[in-house]
Image: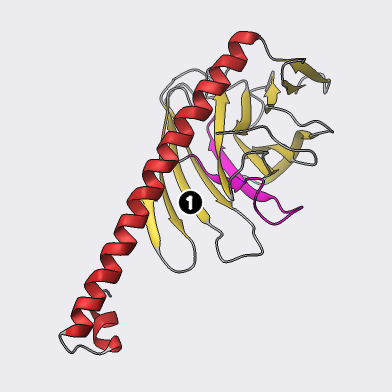
Amino acid sequence: MPNTFELIASSTVGAGGTSAITFSSIASTWTDLVLKFSLRTDASLGQDNVKLYINGGTANQYLTTKDVRGNGSAASSASEVMVINGNTATSNTFGNGEIYLPNYAGSTNKSMSADSVSENNATTAFTFLNALLWSQTSAITSIAIGSATGNLMQYSTAYLYGVKNA
Amino acid sequence: MPNPTRIEINCETGVESIIELTDAEVAELTYQAELAAEKKAEEDAKASAEAEAKASAQAKLAALGLTAEEIAALSK
């Protein structure tokens, strides 16, 4: 069981927003990676979805996912990459989540897991659990997170942690 | 009007840069956003249709004389 957890880097989006937050030049020092995020987008939606850009690829390139989602009254399943807040959710609320990337520097395809929630002081909010597969055998050296339909708004944050088993 | 930006943090140096997207990257983002919006609209329509079908089925069962508890038990 990994017994270390170290902050590698973090970022907070400034005024004007941004399309994505990229962590580049990730060393292969750790066993696993954890990306934690708190995001709100400018899309005219209550809930938006995430786009991942791995090793400089295009949005969700080589990535497949299955999600199971719930809103408190019904559960369903689809293939969206996590849920975050859009800009019609309650003001100043953010969607939160975490992606766990085990063996990110290995030489096999990379499986990942993620949990995420949208937050909304209204009747509709979601929780997602995702299983993800990045079908490439190269080590992950760069990962970026952005919105499926808009830009990340000010005060959105992302934190990248390294987990090591020794 | 300038293009949107992206933030890049170099994990080796800790240096954070704000980089303006190229026109090609903006076009790709726009395309991806359109695809996402279409997919979301399809999923929303499917969910709405399923909810309507469920409500309709429950109403028909109630008309046959089933109680609310009996109808709820059918979906467990």
| Residue located beneath label 1 in the image | A129
Q: Residues within 10 Å of mark 1 (few under 14, many from 20)?
A: many
The chosen color scheme is: secondary structure
Q: On what subunit does the disc labeled 1 rest?
A: A
**Amino acid type, label 1:** Leu
Q: Is residue A75 left or right of residue A32?
A: left
Q: Which residues are magenta?
A: A81-104
- The image shows residue B17, relative to residue B61, as above or below, that is above
Q: Position of residue A56 (x, y in %)?
A: 58, 16
User: Where A118 falls versus A100 (above or below)?
Assistant: below
The residue under the point 49% across, 28% down is B34
Residue A84 on the magenta segment: yes
All told, the count of numbered labels is 1
**Residue occupying image coordinates x 80% and y 41%:** A155
Q: Position of residue B26 (x, y in %)?
A: 62, 16
Image quadrant occupied by the C terminus of chain A: top right
Q: x and y percent of residue A37 in the render?
A: 68, 43
Q: Judge by depth and name the residue closer to the eye, A32 or B1.
A: B1
Can you see residue A166? no
- Left or right? Give the position of B37 relative to A153: left
Q: Is residue A30 visible to the viewer in this orientation of the structure? A: yes
Please identify the quarter of the rendering in which residue B56 is found.
bottom left
Name the residue nearer the viewer: B34 or A95: B34
